[in-house]
């Protein structure tokens, strides 16, 4: 599993906040979901590395 194709930590969150600031709430929801998915992928990758380490 790899999160390399996803945007790094913070980028999705920043985009969500910017969308909220521009009153694009539906877009902000999508970016927030992407931020959560990316964080879960990074956590799973870290847990896998620990288990294999």
Image (cartoon, grey):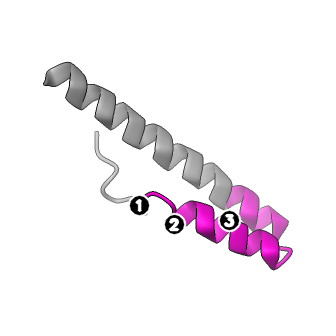
Taking depth in this image into account, of 30 and 16 the one nearest to the observer is 16
User: Is residue 22 found left or right of 14 in the rendered image?
Assistant: right
Dot 2 corresponds to which residue? 11
Which label is found at residue 8?
1
Q: Secondary structure at mark 2?
A: helix
Q: Which residues are magenta?
A: 9-30
Looking at the picture, how far across and down is residue 42, in whole percent? 38, 42
Task: Tell me where residue 17 sits by quadrant.
Answer: bottom right
CA distance separating discs 3 and 2: 9 Å
The prevailing secondary structure element of the residues shown in magenta is: helix
In the displayed structure, would residue 50 be above or below residue 19?
A: above
In the displayed structure, would residue 15 be above or below residue 52?
A: below
Which label is found at residue 16?
3
In the displayed structure, would residue 19 be above or below residue 1?
A: below
Disc 3, disc 2: CB below 8 Å? no
Looking at the picture, how far across and down is residue 7, in whole percent? 43, 63
Disc 1, disc 2: CB below 8 Å? yes
Task: Tell me where residue 13 sits by quadrant.
Answer: bottom right
Task: Tell me where residue 19 sits by quadrant.
Answer: bottom right
Q: Secondary structure at mark 3?
A: helix
Q: Secondary structure at mark 1?
A: loop
Q: Is residue 51 magenta?
A: no
Disc 3, disc 1: CB below 8 Å? no
Extreme-top residue of the structure: 51
């Amino acid at each position: 599993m790899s999160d390399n194709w996803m945007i790094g930590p913070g980028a999705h969150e920043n985009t969500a906040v910017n969308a909220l600031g521009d009153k694009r709430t539906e877009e902000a929801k999508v970016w927030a979901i992407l931020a959560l998915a990316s964080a879960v992928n990074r956590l799973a990758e870290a847990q896998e590395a620990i288990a294999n380490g």
